[in-house]
Amino acid sequence: MPADVTCDVLPETVLTVEQAQERILETIQAITETEQLELSQANGRLLAETIQAGFDVPPHRNSAMDGYAFAHESLASTATLQQIGISWAGRPYLGSVSLGECVRIMTGACLPEGTDTVEMQENTQQQADQITLHTRPQCGEHVRYPGDDFKQGEIILETGRKLTAADLGLIASLGIPAVKVIRKPRIAFLSTGDELQTLGTPLAWGQIYDSNRYTLRALLQNLPVELIDLGIIPDQPQAVEQAFIQAQQQADLLITSGGVSVGEADFVTRSLQKLGEINFWKMAMKPGKPLAQGRLGNCLFFGLPGNPVSVMATFLLFVRPAILKLAGINVVQPRLHPALTLTPLKKVPGRKDFQRGIYTETAEGYQVRSTGKQESHLLRSMSQANCFIVLERDSGDVEAGSQVNILLFESLS
Ligand code: AMP
Ligand code: MG
């Protein structure tokens, strides 16, 4: 072992999955730093200011129909009005309308002075400039008033709100071009391993392609984050430490894969211990033990195992909730569903298993079958699966026909 790698004894406590999840979330504070974003970029972001209406919306009294606008009082003496002009949406009629007169009016056009009521075109008959009303509308019919939607001074959106399509429309209707939002967490990620080759380059004897970084990137792309891809890092302590220092400077959270075990070439946990702090690194979970969790200064750290299935399972169960909390999004533990297993399941007591399963929903409830072999290097099992079959720590083998719990992948995306 190189001289600059600390040999201190690593903490030995083995946590349960639930303890690990709790211990992670306890250490995380939501990001409060903000950025100013153009409205077109703000969908789904957390608002970091209150939005107050600077004026009434709608701003003007306008027509809800294509028809004719007039003073209701005119109808006391006649049902036929003289058309004296047209009010278009965006091009209002500027004159004033006297008793016995009307203007042709379009939907969204301003009501001219002297008018208070609109009759829809379908209920009228036109002869030259004489408009006869077939029915007698109520005073104020088909008129939209200023502030109908909201009034000047009203708070229409509160700080902390996740902006929706409708919210963005509301803000736009006030003419506000940019808003203050919470900045996204910056997530750095890298792969460790001397055996890893970049895509597009032929494999030498003993090499494999770096698949984890593509899986991780895709998992991260489902979340509101900025990505910093730090590439493939060789199994050398200096290289690992250099990457850690870079991540600490640039990111809120670093995810690594590989090198967290106790092999001669596993430098991740030891480098974390040297440059930062370890929260825990052993967990009674399969796949996924070990998982090195801690921090490098202000940068949260998740050292995932190298096996591709373990990467996905530990990401979904531990990293994803951490990122959500960092991003200011409420973390709800996904619900387990009872399901009948159609296949027997092999299980050794001692660790909580997250086996790959394929569920279907039937009239009697969920049914699930195993994808087959459960080793953590078989990524295809994740590609075929649509759920984890969750087997509690003390459980042994499970017979076909038993009830188990499943965790749907769709509740983790
Ligand atoms: P490690 O945790 O570094 O001992 O790696 C465990 C297993 O995962 C080994 O078989 C590695 O070759 C494999 N592995 C590690 N990193 C990757 C990666 N980025 N892509 C695919 N397989 C990997
Ligand atoms: Mg390795």
Image: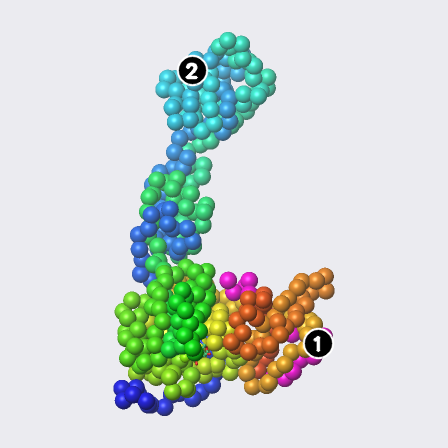
Q: Which residues are magenta?
A: 394-413
Disc 2 beta carbon < 8 A from ligand 1? no
Q: Is residue 182 magenta?
A: no
Name the residue located 66 percent from the left edge and 69 percent from the top edge.
368
Residue 186 falls left or right of residue 212: left
Q: Picture coordinates of residue 306 (x, y %)?
A: 44, 76
Q: Picture coordinates of residue 55 (x, y %)?
A: 35, 38
Name the residue located 45 percent from the left edge and 29 percent from the top edge.
108
Q: Earlier in the sequence, mark 1 or mark 2?
A: 2
Image quarter in which the N terminus is found: bottom left
Name the residue located 30 percent from the left edge and 77 percent from the top edge.
239
Disc 1 beta carbon < 8 A from ligand 1? no
Task: Locate residue 189: give its quadrant.
Answer: bottom left
Quadrant where ligand 2 appears: bottom left
Q: What residue sits right under mark 2 in the picture?
A: 85
Name the residue located 42 percent from the left edge and 83 percent from the top edge.
261
Question: In this view of the protein, can residue 38 be seen by the observer?
Answer: yes
Question: In this view of the protein, can residue 278 be seen by the observer?
Answer: no
Say if 81 sits above or below 150 in the image: above
Q: What residue sits right under mark 1 in the picture?
A: 400
